Image (tube, grey):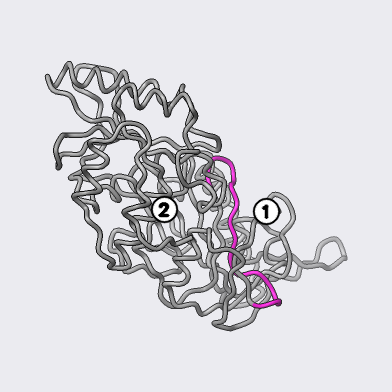
Amino acid sequence: MKKKLRVISINFPFADGSVVHTPLDSDRALFDFDVVVIRPPEFSGPWHDLAIYEHLRSVMATKKRELDSLFLQGGVLVVFLDVPDFYRVETRRYGSSGSVIVDNYDFLDNRLAGCVRKGRGDQITYNTSAEPFVSVLKKSTIAWTAYITKVPPAPLDALKFFAHAGAGGALAGKMPYGEGHIIILPNIQHLEEDSKLLYEKGKAQLEPIVLRALDDLDFGTSPGEVIEGTIHEIDGRTSKGSSPGIVEVKGSKNQISQSEFSPFVTKILADSEVKKKYSKGILVGNGLCETEPGNRLGDSVFSPHVLDGAKRNSIALINSVELYWLCCVLLRGDPVDKNAVREAILTGNGYVDLKPFSGQSPF
Protein backbone atom coordinates (compact mmCIF):
# COMPACT_ATOMS: atom_id res chain seq x y z
CA MET A 1 0.00 0.00 0.00
CA LYS A 2 1.44 3.32 -1.07
CA LYS A 3 2.38 5.82 1.64
CA LYS A 4 0.20 8.94 1.53
CA LEU A 5 0.41 12.26 3.26
CA ARG A 6 -1.80 12.40 6.34
CA VAL A 7 -3.92 15.53 6.05
CA ILE A 8 -6.33 17.06 8.55
CA SER A 9 -8.62 19.92 7.58
CA ILE A 10 -10.39 22.28 9.97
CA ASN A 11 -13.34 24.29 8.66
CA PHE A 12 -12.30 23.73 5.04
CA PRO A 13 -13.94 21.05 2.87
CA PHE A 14 -11.94 18.59 0.76
CA ALA A 15 -13.41 16.18 -1.77
CA ASP A 16 -10.63 13.68 -1.02
CA GLY A 17 -12.11 11.12 1.34
CA SER A 18 -8.74 10.41 2.96
CA VAL A 19 -8.61 13.92 4.47
CA VAL A 20 -9.75 14.03 8.11
CA HIS A 21 -12.28 16.82 8.77
CA THR A 22 -12.72 18.18 12.30
CA PRO A 23 -13.60 21.39 14.16
CA LEU A 24 -10.76 23.25 15.84
CA ASP A 25 -11.75 22.05 19.31
CA SER A 26 -11.46 18.39 18.28
CA ASP A 27 -9.20 16.19 20.41
CA ARG A 28 -7.32 15.06 17.28
CA ALA A 29 -3.66 16.00 17.83
CA LEU A 30 -2.46 18.12 14.89
CA PHE A 31 1.08 16.70 15.07
CA ASP A 32 -0.34 13.27 14.19
CA PHE A 33 -0.57 14.56 10.60
CA ASP A 34 1.82 15.71 7.89
CA VAL A 35 -0.30 18.61 6.63
CA VAL A 36 -2.74 20.70 8.67
CA VAL A 37 -5.26 22.91 6.85
CA ILE A 38 -7.13 25.53 8.91
CA ARG A 39 -9.71 28.14 8.02
CA PRO A 40 -10.05 30.27 11.16
CA PRO A 41 -13.34 29.58 12.95
CA GLU A 42 -16.22 32.00 13.36
CA PHE A 43 -17.12 32.61 16.99
CA SER A 44 -20.74 32.43 18.09
CA GLY A 45 -22.67 33.41 21.24
CA PRO A 46 -23.84 33.60 23.86
CA TRP A 47 -21.52 36.57 24.06
CA HIS A 48 -19.45 37.77 27.00
CA ASP A 49 -19.58 34.42 28.76
CA LEU A 50 -16.43 33.78 30.80
CA ALA A 51 -16.75 29.99 30.49
CA ILE A 52 -16.87 30.23 26.68
CA TYR A 53 -13.87 32.56 26.69
CA GLU A 54 -11.88 30.15 28.86
CA HIS A 55 -12.79 27.26 26.54
CA LEU A 56 -11.71 29.19 23.43
CA ARG A 57 -8.48 30.32 25.05
CA SER A 58 -7.68 26.74 26.10
CA VAL A 59 -8.38 25.41 22.58
CA MET A 60 -6.12 28.02 20.97
CA ALA A 61 -3.28 27.35 23.42
CA THR A 62 -3.57 23.58 22.87
CA LYS A 63 -3.56 23.85 19.09
CA LYS A 64 -0.62 26.24 19.17
CA ARG A 65 1.40 23.69 21.17
CA GLU A 66 0.39 20.94 18.75
CA LEU A 67 1.43 23.07 15.78
CA ASP A 68 4.81 23.74 17.39
CA SER A 69 5.33 19.97 17.46
CA LEU A 70 4.12 19.69 13.85
CA PHE A 71 6.76 22.20 12.71
CA LEU A 72 9.51 20.40 14.64
CA GLN A 73 8.83 17.24 12.64
CA GLY A 74 8.75 19.00 9.27
CA GLY A 75 4.99 19.43 8.94
CA VAL A 76 3.13 21.99 6.85
CA LEU A 77 0.38 24.35 8.03
CA VAL A 78 -1.94 25.86 5.40
CA VAL A 79 -4.10 28.77 6.61
CA PHE A 80 -6.96 30.02 4.45
CA LEU A 81 -7.53 33.69 5.27
CA ASP A 82 -11.00 34.49 6.59
CA VAL A 83 -12.65 37.32 8.46
CA PRO A 84 -10.92 38.03 11.79
CA ASP A 85 -13.21 37.38 14.75
CA PHE A 86 -12.87 38.16 18.46
CA TYR A 87 -14.49 36.93 21.66
CA ARG A 88 -14.35 39.55 24.40
CA VAL A 89 -15.27 39.29 28.08
CA GLU A 90 -15.42 42.26 30.43
CA THR A 91 -13.71 41.63 33.75
CA ARG A 92 -13.83 43.33 37.10
CA ARG A 93 -11.29 42.66 39.80
CA TYR A 94 -10.32 44.55 42.94
CA GLY A 95 -12.55 47.49 42.00
CA SER A 96 -11.14 47.96 38.47
CA SER A 97 -12.58 46.82 35.17
CA GLY A 98 -11.02 45.61 31.94
CA SER A 99 -11.46 43.04 29.25
CA VAL A 100 -9.85 39.87 27.92
CA ILE A 101 -9.92 38.81 24.27
CA VAL A 102 -9.28 35.68 22.25
CA ASP A 103 -9.24 35.85 18.44
CA ASN A 104 -9.67 33.21 15.76
CA TYR A 105 -6.02 33.37 14.61
CA ASP A 106 -4.60 32.71 18.10
CA PHE A 107 -3.81 29.09 17.16
CA LEU A 108 -0.85 30.52 15.21
CA ASP A 109 0.02 33.92 16.72
CA ASN A 110 -2.02 36.36 18.78
CA ARG A 111 -0.82 39.31 16.70
CA LEU A 112 -1.72 37.97 13.27
CA ALA A 113 -5.41 38.95 13.43
CA GLY A 114 -4.38 42.58 13.89
CA CYS A 115 -2.82 42.47 10.41
CA VAL A 116 -5.90 40.94 8.73
CA ARG A 117 -8.83 42.99 7.41
CA LYS A 118 -12.30 41.94 6.30
CA GLY A 119 -13.07 42.38 2.61
CA ARG A 120 -14.54 40.34 -0.25
CA GLY A 121 -13.43 39.93 -3.84
CA ASP A 122 -12.34 37.53 -6.54
CA GLN A 123 -9.62 39.49 -8.35
CA ILE A 124 -6.06 38.41 -7.61
CA THR A 125 -2.66 39.44 -8.96
CA TYR A 126 0.59 37.49 -8.76
CA ASN A 127 4.07 38.96 -8.46
CA THR A 128 5.79 35.75 -9.58
CA SER A 129 5.05 32.78 -11.81
CA ALA A 130 7.78 30.65 -10.25
CA GLU A 131 5.90 29.93 -7.01
CA PRO A 132 4.25 26.47 -7.20
CA PHE A 133 1.15 27.64 -5.32
CA VAL A 134 0.43 30.19 -8.06
CA SER A 135 -0.42 27.37 -10.45
CA VAL A 136 -2.72 25.85 -7.79
CA LEU A 137 -4.53 29.15 -7.24
CA LYS A 138 -4.93 29.72 -10.98
CA LYS A 139 -6.69 26.36 -11.29
CA SER A 140 -8.90 27.06 -8.26
CA THR A 141 -11.92 29.35 -7.83
CA ILE A 142 -10.89 32.27 -5.62
CA ALA A 143 -13.43 33.99 -3.37
CA TRP A 144 -11.35 35.90 -0.83
CA THR A 145 -12.97 37.23 2.32
CA ALA A 146 -9.95 38.79 4.04
CA TYR A 147 -6.50 40.15 3.23
CA ILE A 148 -3.30 41.04 5.06
CA THR A 149 -2.46 44.74 5.22
CA LYS A 150 1.13 44.47 6.48
CA VAL A 151 3.85 41.96 7.25
CA PRO A 152 3.06 40.42 10.66
CA PRO A 153 5.57 40.83 13.50
CA ALA A 154 8.15 38.15 14.32
CA PRO A 155 8.14 35.20 14.11
CA LEU A 156 5.87 35.57 11.06
CA ASP A 157 7.85 38.43 9.54
CA ALA A 158 9.61 36.02 7.16
CA LEU A 159 6.40 35.60 5.12
CA LYS A 160 7.06 36.22 1.43
CA PHE A 161 3.86 37.26 -0.33
CA PHE A 162 3.25 36.15 -3.90
CA ALA A 163 -0.43 37.08 -4.45
CA HIS A 164 -2.25 40.33 -3.76
CA ALA A 165 -5.70 41.91 -3.79
CA GLY A 166 -4.57 44.77 -6.01
CA ALA A 167 -2.81 47.44 -3.98
CA GLY A 168 -5.01 46.81 -0.96
CA GLY A 169 -3.18 43.94 0.66
CA ALA A 170 -1.66 40.49 0.41
CA LEU A 171 -3.64 37.29 -0.15
CA ALA A 172 -1.01 34.55 -0.22
CA GLY A 173 2.47 33.96 1.15
CA LYS A 174 4.74 31.31 2.61
CA MET A 175 7.71 30.92 4.90
CA PRO A 176 9.83 28.18 6.46
CA TYR A 177 9.02 27.63 10.13
CA GLY A 178 11.18 25.32 12.21
CA GLU A 179 11.66 22.23 10.07
CA GLY A 180 8.33 22.82 8.32
CA HIS A 181 6.45 25.54 6.44
CA ILE A 182 3.57 27.96 6.90
CA ILE A 183 1.43 28.65 3.83
CA ILE A 184 -1.10 31.50 3.74
CA LEU A 185 -3.76 31.31 1.01
CA PRO A 186 -6.93 33.29 0.19
CA ASN A 187 -10.35 31.85 0.84
CA ILE A 188 -11.23 29.49 -2.00
CA GLN A 189 -14.60 28.38 -3.29
CA HIS A 190 -13.11 25.40 -5.17
CA LEU A 191 -9.60 24.08 -4.55
CA GLU A 192 -7.58 22.28 -7.22
CA GLU A 193 -6.64 19.34 -4.97
CA ASP A 194 -4.66 17.30 -7.50
CA SER A 195 -1.80 19.77 -8.04
CA LYS A 196 1.56 18.42 -6.84
CA LEU A 197 3.93 20.67 -4.95
CA LEU A 198 7.48 19.36 -5.02
CA TYR A 199 9.33 21.85 -2.85
CA GLU A 200 9.53 20.14 0.55
CA LYS A 201 12.59 18.62 2.16
CA GLY A 202 10.86 16.75 5.01
CA LYS A 203 10.74 12.95 4.90
CA ALA A 204 7.01 12.83 5.53
CA GLN A 205 6.16 15.35 2.81
CA LEU A 206 8.57 14.77 -0.08
CA GLU A 207 8.90 10.99 -0.34
CA PRO A 208 5.22 10.09 -0.88
CA ILE A 209 4.76 12.92 -3.39
CA VAL A 210 7.76 11.75 -5.41
CA LEU A 211 6.52 8.15 -5.39
CA ARG A 212 3.08 9.34 -6.51
CA ALA A 213 4.67 11.36 -9.33
CA LEU A 214 6.70 8.37 -10.53
CA ASP A 215 3.61 6.19 -10.32
CA ASP A 216 1.72 8.69 -12.50
CA LEU A 217 4.51 8.13 -15.05
CA ASP A 218 3.84 4.35 -14.95
CA PHE A 219 6.92 3.33 -12.99
CA GLY A 220 4.92 0.94 -10.81
CA THR A 221 6.16 2.20 -7.45
CA SER A 222 6.07 0.57 -4.04
CA PRO A 223 6.76 2.28 -0.71
CA GLY A 224 9.93 2.39 1.34
CA GLU A 225 11.31 -0.62 3.15
CA VAL A 226 14.31 -1.97 5.00
CA ILE A 227 16.28 -4.25 2.68
CA GLU A 228 15.86 -7.79 3.95
CA GLY A 229 18.72 -8.97 6.15
CA THR A 230 20.34 -5.51 6.29
CA ILE A 231 20.10 -2.24 8.20
CA HIS A 232 19.62 -0.24 5.00
CA GLU A 233 16.34 1.60 4.40
CA ILE A 234 15.26 2.62 0.90
CA ASP A 235 12.58 5.17 0.01
CA GLY A 236 10.81 3.05 -2.60
CA ARG A 237 11.06 0.72 -5.58
CA THR A 238 9.90 0.77 -9.20
CA SER A 239 8.86 -2.37 -11.06
CA LYS A 240 7.95 -1.37 -14.62
CA GLY A 241 10.28 -0.74 -17.53
CA SER A 242 13.53 -2.27 -18.74
CA SER A 243 14.87 -2.78 -15.21
CA PRO A 244 13.68 -2.55 -11.61
CA GLY A 245 14.65 0.57 -9.72
CA ILE A 246 15.46 1.72 -6.21
CA VAL A 247 14.34 5.24 -5.32
CA GLU A 248 16.17 7.64 -3.02
CA VAL A 249 14.66 11.07 -2.22
CA LYS A 250 16.77 13.89 -0.85
CA GLY A 251 15.90 17.49 -0.02
CA SER A 252 18.18 20.27 1.14
CA LYS A 253 18.42 24.04 1.46
CA ASN A 254 21.77 23.62 -0.31
CA GLN A 255 22.94 21.45 -3.19
CA ILE A 256 22.56 17.70 -2.72
CA SER A 257 25.97 16.79 -1.33
CA GLN A 258 28.30 13.82 -1.55
CA SER A 259 27.49 12.87 2.05
CA GLU A 260 23.80 12.55 1.08
CA PHE A 261 24.60 10.64 -2.12
CA SER A 262 27.24 8.09 -1.08
CA PRO A 263 25.01 6.00 1.28
CA PHE A 264 22.72 5.36 -1.69
CA VAL A 265 25.53 3.55 -3.51
CA THR A 266 25.95 1.27 -0.51
CA LYS A 267 22.20 0.55 -0.44
CA ILE A 268 22.13 -0.41 -4.13
CA LEU A 269 25.06 -2.82 -3.69
CA ALA A 270 23.50 -4.34 -0.54
CA ASP A 271 20.21 -4.84 -2.36
CA SER A 272 21.92 -6.52 -5.32
CA GLU A 273 23.57 -9.02 -2.98
CA VAL A 274 20.23 -9.88 -1.36
CA LYS A 275 18.13 -9.95 -4.55
CA LYS A 276 20.85 -11.50 -6.73
CA LYS A 277 20.10 -8.89 -9.37
CA TYR A 278 20.98 -5.24 -9.90
CA SER A 279 18.34 -2.49 -9.60
CA LYS A 280 18.74 0.92 -11.19
CA GLY A 281 19.42 3.71 -8.71
CA ILE A 282 17.08 6.72 -9.08
CA LEU A 283 17.87 9.69 -6.85
CA VAL A 284 15.31 12.50 -6.87
CA GLY A 285 16.95 15.64 -5.52
CA ASN A 286 15.08 18.63 -4.13
CA GLY A 287 18.18 20.73 -3.68
CA LEU A 288 18.18 24.48 -3.03
CA CYS A 289 14.58 23.92 -1.88
CA GLU A 290 14.04 27.45 -0.54
CA THR A 291 14.95 28.99 -3.92
CA GLU A 292 12.11 29.77 -6.32
CA PRO A 293 11.50 26.64 -8.43
CA GLY A 294 12.00 28.38 -11.77
CA ASN A 295 15.52 29.35 -10.71
CA ARG A 296 16.72 25.84 -9.86
CA LEU A 297 16.24 23.85 -13.03
CA GLY A 298 18.99 21.70 -14.51
CA ASP A 299 21.81 19.93 -12.69
CA SER A 300 22.68 22.82 -10.36
CA VAL A 301 20.77 21.22 -7.46
CA PHE A 302 23.46 18.52 -7.31
CA SER A 303 27.05 19.14 -6.26
CA PRO A 304 29.86 18.40 -8.78
CA HIS A 305 30.92 15.36 -6.70
CA VAL A 306 27.38 13.94 -6.85
CA LEU A 307 27.15 14.50 -10.60
CA ASP A 308 30.45 12.68 -11.13
CA GLY A 309 29.62 9.89 -8.65
CA ALA A 310 26.26 9.21 -10.32
CA LYS A 311 27.92 8.74 -13.70
CA ARG A 312 30.54 6.39 -12.24
CA ASN A 313 27.91 4.30 -10.40
CA SER A 314 25.20 4.29 -13.09
CA ILE A 315 22.69 6.24 -10.98
CA ALA A 316 20.06 8.53 -12.50
CA LEU A 317 19.71 11.96 -10.91
CA ILE A 318 16.31 13.69 -11.21
CA ASN A 319 15.64 17.33 -10.39
CA SER A 320 12.36 17.40 -8.40
CA VAL A 321 11.31 20.70 -9.99
CA GLU A 322 11.53 19.12 -13.44
CA LEU A 323 9.51 16.17 -12.16
CA TYR A 324 6.91 18.67 -10.90
CA TRP A 325 6.93 20.37 -14.33
CA LEU A 326 6.28 17.02 -16.01
CA CYS A 327 3.39 16.33 -13.62
CA CYS A 328 1.88 19.73 -14.49
CA VAL A 329 1.87 18.62 -18.13
CA LEU A 330 0.04 15.43 -17.15
CA LEU A 331 -2.52 17.38 -15.10
CA ARG A 332 -3.16 19.71 -18.05
CA GLY A 333 -3.97 16.66 -20.12
CA ASP A 334 -1.15 17.31 -22.59
CA PRO A 335 0.37 14.24 -24.27
CA VAL A 336 3.41 12.73 -22.53
CA ASP A 337 5.40 9.75 -23.80
CA LYS A 338 5.58 7.98 -20.44
CA ASN A 339 7.59 5.05 -21.84
CA ALA A 340 10.23 7.41 -23.23
CA VAL A 341 10.46 9.28 -19.91
CA ARG A 342 10.74 6.05 -17.93
CA GLU A 343 13.43 4.57 -20.18
CA ALA A 344 15.43 7.80 -20.21
CA ILE A 345 15.62 7.53 -16.43
CA LEU A 346 16.21 3.77 -16.26
CA THR A 347 19.04 3.93 -18.80
CA GLY A 348 20.50 7.31 -17.83
CA ASN A 349 23.67 7.85 -15.82
CA GLY A 350 24.15 11.11 -13.94
CA TYR A 351 21.72 14.00 -14.37
CA VAL A 352 18.72 13.11 -16.55
CA ASP A 353 17.19 16.17 -18.20
CA LEU A 354 13.36 15.91 -18.13
CA LYS A 355 12.71 19.30 -19.73
CA PRO A 356 12.63 17.98 -23.33
CA PHE A 357 9.66 15.77 -22.34
CA SER A 358 7.77 18.50 -20.51
CA GLY A 359 6.38 21.02 -23.00
CA GLN A 360 5.25 24.44 -21.77
CA SER A 361 6.87 25.55 -18.53
CA PRO A 362 4.59 26.26 -15.52
CA PHE A 363 7.16 28.83 -14.38
Q: Residues within 10 Å of mark 1 (few under 14, many from 20)?
A: some
Residue 89's x, y, as percent? Answer: 71, 70
Q: Residue at x 30, y 50 (%)?
A: 213
Q: Which residues are magenta?
A: 166-180
The residue positioned 20% from the left and 39% from the top of the image is 238
Q: Amino acid at mark 2?
A: Arg
Against 304, is 46 above or below?
Answer: below
Where 353 sits versus 52, above or below? Answer: above
Mark 1 and mark 2: span between their CA atoms?
Answer: 25 Å
Q: In this orientation, which residue lies closer to the viewer: 113 or 103?
A: 113
Specify the quadrant of the image occupied by residue 82: bottom right
Main SS, magenta residues: strand
The residue identified by callout 2 is 28
Instruction: Say the numbered circle drawn on residue 148.
Output: none
Q: Nearer the viewer, residue 188 or 338?
A: 338
The residue singled out by tag 1 in the image is 156
Q: Is residue 291 left or right of residue 363?
A: right
